[in-house]
Image: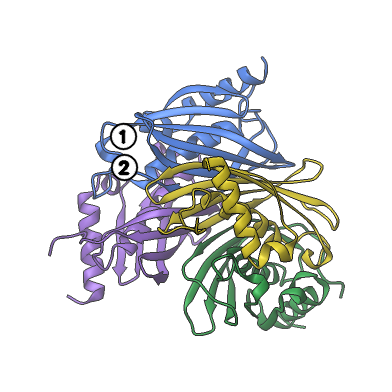
Chain colours: A blue, B purple, C green, D yellow
Amino acid sequence: MDANELANHVAQEMLAGEGTGPAWGIKIEEAREDYARISMVVRADMLNSHRIAHGGMIFALADTAFAYVCNGANHASVAAQASIVFLDKVVEGESLIAEATEVAREGRAGVTRVAVRAGDGRAIAEFTGYSRTLGGPVVEM
Amino acid sequence: MDANELANHVAQEMLAGEGTGPAWGIKIEEAREDYARISMVVRADMLNSHRIAHGGMIFALADTAFAYVCNGANHASVAAQASIVFLDKVVEGESLIAEATEVAREGRAGVTRVAVRAGDGRAIAEFTGYSRTLGGPVVEM
Amino acid sequence: MDANELANHVAQEMLAGEGTGPAWGIKIEEAREDYARISMVVRADMLNSHRIAHGGMIFALADTAFAYVCNGANHASVAAQASIVFLDKVVEGESLIAEATEVAREGRAGVTRVAVRAGDGRAIAEFTGYSRTLGGPVVEM
Amino acid sequence: MDANELANHVAQEMLAGEGTGPAWGIKIEEAREDYARISMVVRADMLNSHRIAHGGMIFALADTAFAYVCNGANHASVAAQASIVFLDKVVEGESLIAEATEVAREGRAGVTRVAVRAGDGRAIAEFTGYSRTLGGPVVEM
């Protein structure tokens, strides 16, 4: 298994083993070394009182893509910190696509940038995640 | 209605009108001017593949408390940006309590700090939200 | 030496030993356990092209207060991440006061909140710093 | 003047008109539409008490590159919020290079990512800036 296959395998196993991804309808569009692109469709139970997607769900999608990327070498990692800028709103029935790329790594620390866009390409949010590697595998091989 | 009653009324109406709060089992413990304390219980569908609460759900709880606070004067506001530090993990069945306080306001901008703790008092996360007021009411009075 | 005296001693030694604090004219107004309040006066060489204090200098002041606080127990710590919201501008000759409080600690991680105000009390910025303890003392005793 | 020439002209005028850039020895390596790369050399007055570059100065360099980029279309913009992850240390005499790219824009809001590296290519910090356009030009033409 090369680095791209490993990253895809880890992401698929994480999605299968977590409560959140299936509950939110998350689909992995592509996962490879230092990269993942995932999507979900905005549902009524993801809306705030203005009837647009809740910022918490936009963050949750980006954070999920971040987790798949920072664990993709099968070294268990956790999110230590994350920041998000909200740029535009999305309504029920729209797709959200989160595209995550690890942009830096130094020792146990890593930084992953995630762009969240709507299905029509509108920029919805920009997320930055700071991960720390704990040691140990994510998936038993 | 004084400022504390108004803030509580707005928070209750927001919770009743949104898809997320009821879906996540959010309860408002207290809401008053520039302050809200809310809680939820960690469920299986909120866990990541390590069987601890997903960071996205911890953020979503804090972001909900932030939204109640920054809208509490009944001037419609949105989250423009938010940051979170993750400090400890929580497991299924534990309570999470988010305590939000608006710490600064200047023109249309506001900053709200949210401390997230487990039911036993452990510090789980620290969140900072940056809001902008749009104009118009949240709730028709 | 009790915890408050130790924190003050560490802050004074850090200021005396660093290049930046003296270069920026930083004064320690008060330093005690989990808390520091420091100030500086905005000079011409701290202004951006709009003739207001450069955001980098406002951050630098807050980050300095954060460093004094997170090292105050004399366990060497570093800033791993920080976030800042800019709320208002300041001009040449105004004082800036940064008031830092450690609000959470868990294992090697800590979170410090810093409010930056002008001399007349205007809210200028809100900063959040995430520190990690490395081990070893800051100051030999 | 095309968009790349305009961006370079604005950056050069900002550097010439600000107190900070000349005081810190900042050099513009390249400035074009949605992009700037700038550098400075770490001096003794930029060191903290551990004799490494102060986080405030690393942020200040990144924030300067961000300012040049978000103003590059000659629409006056301000930093509303910024976040930074610190990855490695640098010592006196090393160069720091900040490479800034605007990655999203929606209405008055923009997001600029800045990678800070040492002269030998080590990743030192990752910065994300959130700007808001005020209206009015930066430079009279």
**Quadrant, the C terminus of chain B:** bottom left
C-beta proximity under 8 Å, tags 1 and 2: yes
**Residue B81 rendering spot, x and y as whole percentages:** 44, 53
**Residue D68 rendering spot, x and y as whole percentages:** 58, 52
Say whether disc 1 or disc 2 marks the residue closer to the N-terminus. 1
Image vertical order of residue D6 relative to residue B38, above or below: above
Instruction: Give the quarter of the image for residue D133.
Output: bottom left
**Quadrant, the N terminus of chain B:** bottom left
List the residue tagged with mark 2: A53
Q: How many marks?
A: 2
Instruction: Give the quarter of the image for residue C113.
Output: bottom right
The foreground one among B38 and D91 is D91
Q: Secondary structure at mark 1?
A: loop
Whether discs 1 and 2 lie on one chain: the answer is yes
Image vertical order of residue A47 relative to residue C85, above or below: above
The chain identifier of the residue carrying mark 2 reads: A
Q: Secondary structure at mark 2?
A: loop
Q: Three-letter amino acid code at disc 1?
A: Val
The foreground one among B95 and D92 is D92
Residue C106 visible (yes or no)? no
The foreground one among C114 and D97 is D97
List the residue tagged with mark 1: A42
CA gap, disc 1 and disc 2: 7 Å
Q: Three-letter amino acid code at disc 2?
A: Ala
Left or right, B37 with respect to A51, comes to right
